[in-house]
Image (cartoon, rainbow, N blue to C red):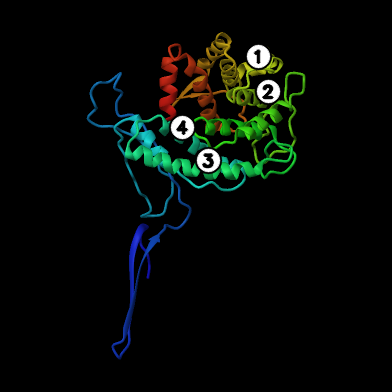
Amino acid sequence: MEAVAAQDKVFLQVKAETKNGVSDQLTMFAKVSSKGFPQDLSKGGFISSQRKQKEIPDFFELPVKLPDTYVAGSLRLEAKVMSSSFATLLEAVEALVKDPYGCFEQTSSTTYPVIMAYNFVSELEETKQTLDLKARLEEKMNMGYKKLVTFETPEEGYEWFGSSPPHEALSAYGLQEFTDMAANSQIVDPVMLDRLKTWILSRKDGKGSFKLSDQALDSFGRAPQVTTDAYILWSLTHAGVKTGLDKEVDALMKQVDSGDSQKDPYVIGLLSCVLWNLGRSSPALKYAKMLPAFIQTIEELHYVDGAKTSITSSEGRYLQLEATSVAILAWLPFQSEFTDELEKTINTLV
C-alpha cells in the first residue's frame, strides 16, 4: 500500500478470507503525513476599515510567499474571513486552551496566555459560548498555578526548577503572572504573593539597582542590568508596590535621560509604565512621547524598532513585537494623545 498524498483522515479496511469461507476484517482510520518537516505560513490583514473606507472592495489581495521547494501534493491553503476584530480575538482565545507542562518558563508559556484570555473573557457579555470558554480557561489556569508554585525556592523567590538560588528576573516575571492571575480569580494565595514581593524587594542593592543571580537558562535572564532593573520595577509597581522605590526609579530615569537607554524604546516604554503605575502621570507622558520616533513601517505593518534587547534577550522580529507591545502599554493611559500610533500598532499585532 502506498500513500500518494497527505490527508488528515483516511479510511482503511483490511479483509482476509480462507478457502473454507472463514473471513475477518479490520477497519480503522489513519492520518497520512507528508515526508519532510511541516511548515506553517500565515498572513492576515484587513479587507476594509469602517472608519476610513465605508465600502467593501470588490477583491482583496494577500500575497503569500511559498518556500522554494516542497513535497508535491503537500500544500494546503485555508482562508478565513472574520466579521470583526472581536471575532478574530475570540477564535484566537480558543486556541490558547492548553495543558501546562515543563519548568517554570515552559509552564508559563501556556498558563500566562490562558490568564490573559481568562481576564479578557471575564469582561465580555455572558453567553453560553463565553461562559463555557471561561470555565475551560479557569480549569487550565488552576492547573498552571498548582504547577508554578512548585518552583518556589526555600529562599522564597522562583527558579526554573525550584532550585537555589532563586532568579530575580524570573521571579519578577512570576510576580506579573500571579498578579494578573489574581485580577479576576481567587486562585492565587495572597500570602505567597506578598512573600514574593518581599523577596524581590530584598534584592535592592541600595545604589538604585537590583542584585542579580549569575544563573540563567537559555536566553531568559541574560538581559543587561538596566533592562532587568526596568522590568523588575515594572513588575513591582504592577503588583501594587507604591513606596520604597524612589532611588531605583530615579536611577532608571537618569539612565534614560542621559545614558544609552535614551535610544532604547523597550526601556523607555517600561519606565513610562512604571511612572504611570506610581501615579506620576506627567513624567510617564514625557517618556511615552519619546516612543513614536521609533516606529518603523515594514510591509505596511508598524513596529517599534531599535530596542537593544528585552528581558528574554529577544532579537529580530520577536524583539520588535515585544518593544511594540511595551509601547502600546505606555500609550494606553494617554489614548487621546496617541490615537494614530495605537491604531497602527494594535492592528499590526492583531
Q: Percent position (x, y) of residue 348?
A: 43, 27
Q: Is residue 27 visible?
A: yes
In the image, which is nearer the foreground, mark 3 or mark 2? 3
Q: Are marks 3 and 2 in contact (CB under 8 Å)?
A: no
Helix, strand or loop under label 2: helix
- Give x and y (percent) for residue 202: 74, 27
153 or 2, nearer to the observer: 153
Asked whether 223 or 260 is in front, the reply is: 223
Q: Nearer the viewer, mark 1 or mark 3?
A: 3
Q: Secondary structure at mark 3?
A: helix
Q: Is residue 292 above or below residue 228?
A: above
Q: Earlier in the sequence, mark 4 or mark 2?
A: 4
Mark linked to residue 253: 1
Q: Amino acid at mark 2?
A: Val
Can residue 65 be seen here? no
Q: Earlier in the sequence, mark 1 or mark 3?
A: 3
Hey, which quadrant is residue 260 in on the image? top right
- Residue at the disc numbered 2: 226
Q: Can you name the residue that lies furthest to the right here?
A: 206
Q: Tell me the element at label 4.
A: helix
Q: Amino acid at mark 4?
A: Asn
Going from the N terminus, do you reach mark 3 or mark 2 first?
3
Expressed as whole percent of the image width and height from the top left, the position of residue 79 reads 32, 41
Kind of residue at disc 1: Met
